[in-house]
Image (spheres, grey):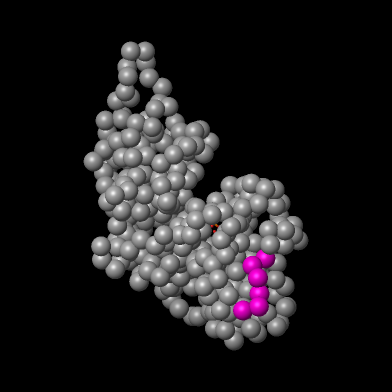
Amino acid sequence: MGADGKRKIAPSGDHVILHDSSFFRRHPTAQLPTPAQVLARCKALGDHPIAPRPRPVRFPALGLLVKFGTAASIVEGQCLYALQGRTVLRVPEVYGWTVENGRAFVYVELIRGVTLQDRWEWLSEKSKTVVCMQIKDMVDDLRQIEEDPMNSYVGAIGNQPPEEILFHSYMTPARSFHSVAEFHDWFALPAPMPPGIQVHPGRFDLPDDASIVFTHGDLHPSNIMISARWPWDRWEWSWAWNIWPWDWPDWISWLWKGEWSWEDPPRVLAIIDWQQSGWMPSYWEYCKARWTTKRGSDWQTTYFPMFIEPTDVLEAWLVFAYIVAF
Ligand SMILES: Nc1ncnc2c1ncn2[C@@H]1O[C@H](COP(=O)(O)OP(=O)(O)O)[C@@H](O)[C@H]1O
Ligand SMILES: [Mg+2]
């Protein structure tokens, strides 16, 4: 296995604090906020901490963001851990995770940028292309990770059930799958069939010989962070983060730390939101990205095919995806 094919194994357990992470080097005397502190901050910002998927809570002074809720999962923390230190792919650094009262809390690096979604309509065609080329390099790097030949499966990292959100409304799988064929049998199962027919005809169009690759599972512009442009983005953040625009000490420290630039085209800072990631058939990334895009948008027709290979499995995939998702 080459250096870039390396797999890092995340520490096991529901309560993990990564004392070696840069959080504790930067703030030697600080601690990660407790779940109660995270929930209190969520409430103070006017959000509902009991929602399954509240907006992640930011602690800008600590360079920290906490993703939490009943629909959050420590699998995301484990995945981020496994993806740290890659040569090209950038993901937020993970500082720890915990579970309390059925809610997961994942502590990660706050990426000081804006989402590609927020910036998309302002970008020139050239900038969009350059951004997609950067994403392509990162996705190619992700694909370098090699499966463990002794432990091949379809599922979330660590041989866990897939966290794919498509499955959540209908039938959450309780386990990972030993092979692509076994996964396909399960995926095709709920499709209604006339009496006497054992296997849905579309099942034969799901390729059992697809390779299994490490897949993000939600490569949507809201999950790609790009460099911010000062001062407009800062103004937007102030609004989004409930930091008063006239909080000058915060502005000055932000300027001083240089977390802004005039870059055009922007730089891709990180790919975020790895909750649905895992070892999936190679066509999954394209089909899933296509599923989340607006029909006819330039993202769908021109840009995301620049970094994910289109596949003709889409048609068969959609048949079953609609059934499991709704
Ligand atoms: N590490 C991060 N740094 C900065 N912003 C983030 C980070 N993680 C999430 N966000 C912001 O929060 C939003 C929701 O987080 P995300 O992980 O995508 O969760 P969801 O599963 O709800 O889509 C993102 O679109 C982004 O605006
Ligand atoms: Mg997201």
Whether 46 is among the magenta residues is no
Q: Percent x, y for residue 55?
A: 63, 56
* Residue farthest along the top direction in this orientation: 196
- Tell me the quadrant of the picture where the N terminus can be found: bottom left
Q: Is residue 63 above or below residue 214?
A: below
Report the residue at 29% width, 57% height from top: 146
Quadrant containing ligand 1: bottom right
Predominant SS of the magenta segment: loop
Report the residue at 32% width, 48% height from top: 151
The reply to whether residue 263 is in sight is yes
Q: Percent x, y for residue 172?
A: 49, 37
- Quadrant of residue 298 within the rendered picture: bottom left
- In this view of the protein, which residue sits in the foreground, 85 or 300? 85
- As drawn, is 180 to the left or to the right of 108? left
In the rendered structure, which segment of residues is drawn in magenta? Answer: 28-33
- As drawn, is 179 to the left or to the right of 160? left
- In this view of the protein, which residue sits in the foreground, 295 or 242? 242
Report the residue at 65% width, 84% height from top: 252
- In this view of the protein, which residue sits in the foreground, 57 or 113? 57
- As drawn, is 287 to the left or to the right of 249? left
Report the residue at 64% width, 83% height from top: 253
Q: Is residue 22 above or below residue 191?
A: below
Whether 30 is among the magenta residues is yes
